[in-house]
Amino acid sequence: SQLLSSQDPRLKNISVIATLPAVSHVHRCAAEQGILMTGLGFVQKEVFLPNGDVLPAALRNPSSYIALDAAGKRFMREDLPYNQWLEEVINRAQGSAVLIASGSGQSLGPYWTITPNLQTLAHDIGLTAPLLANAIADYNNIVDAQVDPLGKSVKALTKHITGPDYMGAQIQVRVLTTLGGIRINQNAQVLDRLRRPIAGLFAAGDVTGGIH
């Protein structure tokens, strides 16, 4: 993430999935040695639960939940296209947020809290009960008024966040992959920053840039 954040400062505190650190270490060492890097501007990101599971598709229905930042405030309209939604989590909530919905009565895994008790839910997601209760009440008022200051479409303002059960989980944006890496020529020779082949040094596979 250190090398990626040199291209996009917003990624400074965004973690990478487990398959990338070894490749990233090679990238960082290569950059420090004056090797030409390419394609670092392309970064594929995804939203994950704390255990590494991808966000369930069921909770991508924008009418079913609200997204809160670390201060317990709604920070975006939840009906954005998914890629824009993900970027808003990075831009406005530093890459992590809390999703709150009415409990569905089904288990979504150990990292989801489903409870009739807002104080229990608030504790599990790292908020205070008053902050959580206020956020839910404010959103329910928005649904009643059918006008969202953040711009959520009326078509998505159809469901209150109500009991008897409430559901919540913390989410994080993580770097899934990048097409960035070491620049090579047609003979797989590694290039320096003046685009000159480095004698005896070759690269192939995931450490190279611009190749998926």
Image: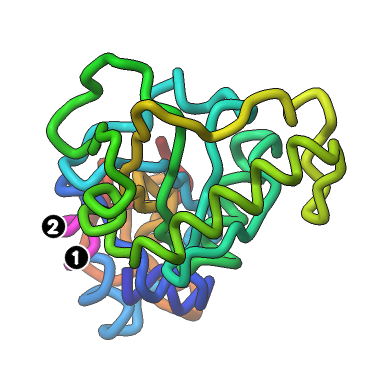
Q: Secondary structure at mark 2?
A: helix
Q: Is residue 33 left or right of residue 200?
A: right
Per the rendering, the mark at residue 22 is 2
Part of the protein shown in magenta: 21-25
User: Residue drawn at (44%, 57%), measured in percent from left and top?
Assistant: 132
Describe residue 159's horizontal placement relative to residue 134 as left or right.
right
Q: Residue at x 55, y 56 (%)?
A: 135
Residue 125 in the image: above or below residue 196 = above
Please state if 148 lies on the left or on the right of 193 as rendered.
right
Can you tell which quarter of the image residue 145 is in?
Answer: top right
Is residue 185 in view? no
State the residue in front, 50 or 140.
140
Residue of label 1: 26
Q: Nearer the viewer, mark 2 or mark 1?
A: 2
| Quadrant housing the C terminus | top left
Q: Relative to residue 35, is residue 212 depicted above or below?
A: above
